Image (spheres, rainbow, N blue to C red):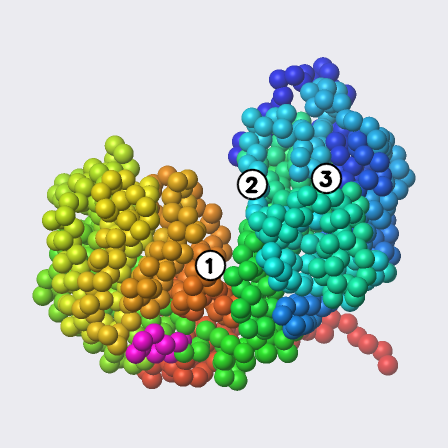
Amino acid sequence: MPPPQPLSVTSSASRTARTSSGTPLRIAVVGGGPGGLYAAALLKRLGPDREVTVWERGAPEDTFGFGVVLSDETLGGIEHADPEVYRALTAEFVRWDDIDVVHRGHRLTSGGHGFAALGRRRLLEILHARCLALGVDLRVRTEAPPTAELSATHDLVIAADGVHSLTRQAHADVFAPRITSHRCRYIWLAADFAFDAFRFEIAETEHGVMQLHGYPYAQGSSTVIVEMREEVWRAAGLDTCDEAESTERCAKIFADALGGRPLKGNNSSWIAFRTVVNERWSHGNIVLLGDAAHTAHFSIGSGTKLAVEDALALAACIEEQPDLPTALAAYETERRPVVESTQRAAAASLRWFEDLAGYLDQPPHQFAFNLLTRSRRVTHDNLRLRDSTFTESVEQDFGCPSGTPPMFTPFRLRGLELRNRVVVSPMDMYSAENGVPGDFHLVHLGARALGGAGLVMTEMVCVSPEGRITPGCTGLYTPEQATAWRRITDFVHQQAPGTAIGVQLGHSGRKGSTRLMWDGIDQPLDEGNWPLAAASPLPYRPGVNQVPAQLDRIGLTDIREQFAAATWRAARCDFDLLELHCAHGYLLSGFLSPLTNQRTDSYGGTLDRRLRFPLEVFDAVRGIWPDDKPMTVRISATDWAAGGTTEEEAVEIARAFVAHGADAIDVSTGQVVSDEAPEFGRSYQTPYADRIRNSLGVPVITVGAISSWDDVNSLLLAGRADLCALARPHLYDPHWTLHAAAEQGYSGTGAPWPLPYGAGSRRPPTGRTDGPKPRLSLRSS
C-alpha cells in the first residue's frame, strides 16, 4: 500500500512547527471513547510539549453498554506503555475463569478461560483522569470542528468517532468503507448482581430462538446482552417496544438466568451489528482508529480491545518513524493483519449465533463445545489444556475410545467403513498421457494411501476427451485408462490395507481446453484446442476462453451416457467410493449456478430446473454404481459473486442429491466465475458444510484451508463435519495423517503404520540445544 498523501487543503505554512524528529506537536482527537482517550494520553505522555485536544460531543457519563472485557495480552501492552493506567485498571477488574452454557435444562461449565472486566463508565473515568493529569485538553459535550478545519490547523487528526464516524463519511472516497449489516438484533442491558461465570443461555420461545450473553464487570453488576434473529425480534413484537418495555420483557424471558431479578438499560435500544471494513485507514494527516476503522462482533469481546491496541500501535509508530506519512503507513501495516484476523474470528462467531437454531438438537456436550469453538480461536487441543475434564466428556459423547483422538474414530458410508476421518482431497496433477494415469499417479496416490488417511481421492477423472480440463488430465473413457487405474487401486488395497480409494468423475464444461496449470492456469492452449460445451454459451473469461456450445437434448444424453460408461469402468477398477463433481464451474456445476445457466428451457431458470440435468446424471451413475458402495457429490455452496448460488440454495441442492441417494455431500465453494471474491481464511469453507449438515442431518465432507490435526479434531467434535478433506497439507507431507497420530501419541487401529515404515513412527532425535551449562561463578558456603 503506498504511503498516504497530504490533503490538498493543507499546506506546510499552516502547520505548527514539528520537533526535529518530525513527530506531530498539535494533535486533534475526534471522539472520547476508550481508543481516543488512550491515544491522547499516550501521545501526551510520550511528548509532554504536544498540544493534544479531545472533542467528545457526549457527556462523560453518556456511554453505551456496561462492561468491558480486556485480554491479558492487551493488559500487558497497557502495563508497558503506561503503568499508571495499568495500576488503575487492575484495581478495578473483576476476574473469572468459567464459561457456563445453558440449554434445554443442561448447564455445562468449562473452566480455565481467564477473563478480566470492568465497567465501561469506570474505564472512561480512569482515562479521563489520566488525560487531565497529563495536560490533555478534554472538550466534552462539544462537537468537533469540521475535518477540513482540523486537518488544516493540526499536525495529526485521529478519528476515533465510532462505527458511525462522520470523519470516515466525509472522506469515503479515500477510505472506501464497506459496511455490512447483519441478521440479528441485540440490546445492551445490565443486572444488579454478578454472574459467577461468562454465561450463554438459550431460550426457545414461541417466536423463535433468543440468546443471552452475560458476564460480571463489577462487584454486584453484570452486563446482559440479549440477541435474536431479526424475524424473531419482529415476531415477538420487540420492534415496537421502548427501552422500558424491552428491558422488562427480556427479564421475563431469561428469568431463570437472572434468578427473577430485573434488568436495567442505559439509553439501550435494539440494534443490528454492522461490520466496518476500510480499504485505507489514513488520508493525509487524518487517521482512523477503533470502530471508525473496523468493527468486530461483541461475542468475542473485541471492540474496546482493538481500539486500545490501535492506540498503542499508533503512538509507537509515531515515535519510531521519521515522519508522519511513514508513521501512519507503518501503523496500518502493523495493525491491519491483526484486525483482519480478529474480524475473521468475529465473523465466524457472529454467523454461529445467527444460525444458532440449526444447532439446538445437538447433544448437550457437543452443543457446548460447538459454541466454545465457534470462532476457531479456541480449538480442541487448546480447550483440553484449559479444561481436560470438560473436553474428555465431549470426546466420550462423540464416541472416542479412551486415548483416541476424534479424527481416528471410524465412519461408515453404506458398506464402506473408513478407519479414520481424514480424506486426501482430489488434486489435479495434470500429468497423464492421453488420459492414462502413469507411474506418477501410482506413486502419488500410493504414497498418500501409505500415509494413513482413511480415504484417498483421485483427481477429477474426465468422462470424455472433450471433458478434460487440460491435455494432462486423467480419464476413464478407454479400456487402457481403466487398466491403469486398476493397477493403482490394486496397489492401495494390497499395500495399504484399510485405506479406501475413491474416484471423482467430472466433465470440464466451459473450463476445458486449457494449458497445464504451471503453463498458465485457465489459459487456452496455443494449439490443439477442442470444442467446449456447457449449460449456456458463456465463456469462462470473455475474450480469453472460447465460447462453449449450449448443449441440446442430444448433447445432454451423450454426456449422461459418458458418465454412465465411466462409472461402469470405475466399478470394474474396484474403487471403493465414487464422487460426482458438481462444483468449481465445471459442466454439472455450470447447470446449478444461475450465473452460468441462463437457459430458458426446462433445464434453466428455477433451481428445480437447474438441478434437473445434474440429477439425471446422478441417477444414471447411481444406477450403475454398486449398491453397497457409497456415492458422494461435491458442490460449490457459494459462487462468491453477486447473483450466484445462495446459502439457502446450497442446502436445497444438497437436499435434492441426498433424496436421490447421495450418501454424503462434499462441500466446497467458488471457482464458478472468474470475477469471484472469496473470503479466504482458516477453514473458511466449513460454515457452508456446517449449515448443510445441521440443516439436513446428512453427512458432509468439509474442505478448504484445514491445515492442522487440531482443526480436524475441533471440526468433528463440534459437529460441523463428518470427514475433513485436506489437499495442500498432503502435498507438503504425504504421511500427514500418520504424523498427526504420532504427534498426539496415538498408535491405534485408526492410523496403523505400514510394517516397513514402523521404525519411522517416532520423531527422529535432533541435536541437543539444552546441554549442561558451564559454572560461571563460585558460591561460598
244 vs 111, nearest the viewer: 244
Q: Residue at x 56, y 26 (%)?
A: 173
Where is residue 209? Give x, y as percent. Answer: 60, 58
Highlighted magenta segment, given as a residue range: 411-420
Question: Label 3 to label 1, Cα distance in Å?
Answer: 43 Å
- Look at label 1 and name its amino acid: Arg
Numbered tag placed on residue 26 in the rendering: none
Q: Is residue 571 left or right of residue 181?
A: left
Q: Is residue 414 magenta?
A: yes
Contact, CB < 8 Å: mark 1 with mark 2? no
* Residue identified by numbered label 2: 180
Most common SS among magenta residues: strand
Contact, CB < 8 Å: mark 3 with mark 2? no
Counting other residues with Cα less than 10 Å from the Cα at mark 1, is it few (<14), some (14-19), or many (20 or more)?
A: many
Where is residue 352? Give x, y as percent. Answer: 56, 57
Question: Label 1 to label 2, Cα distance in Å?
Answer: 21 Å
Counting other residues with Cα less than 10 Å from the Cα at mark 3, is it few (<14), some (14-19), or many (20 or more)?
A: many
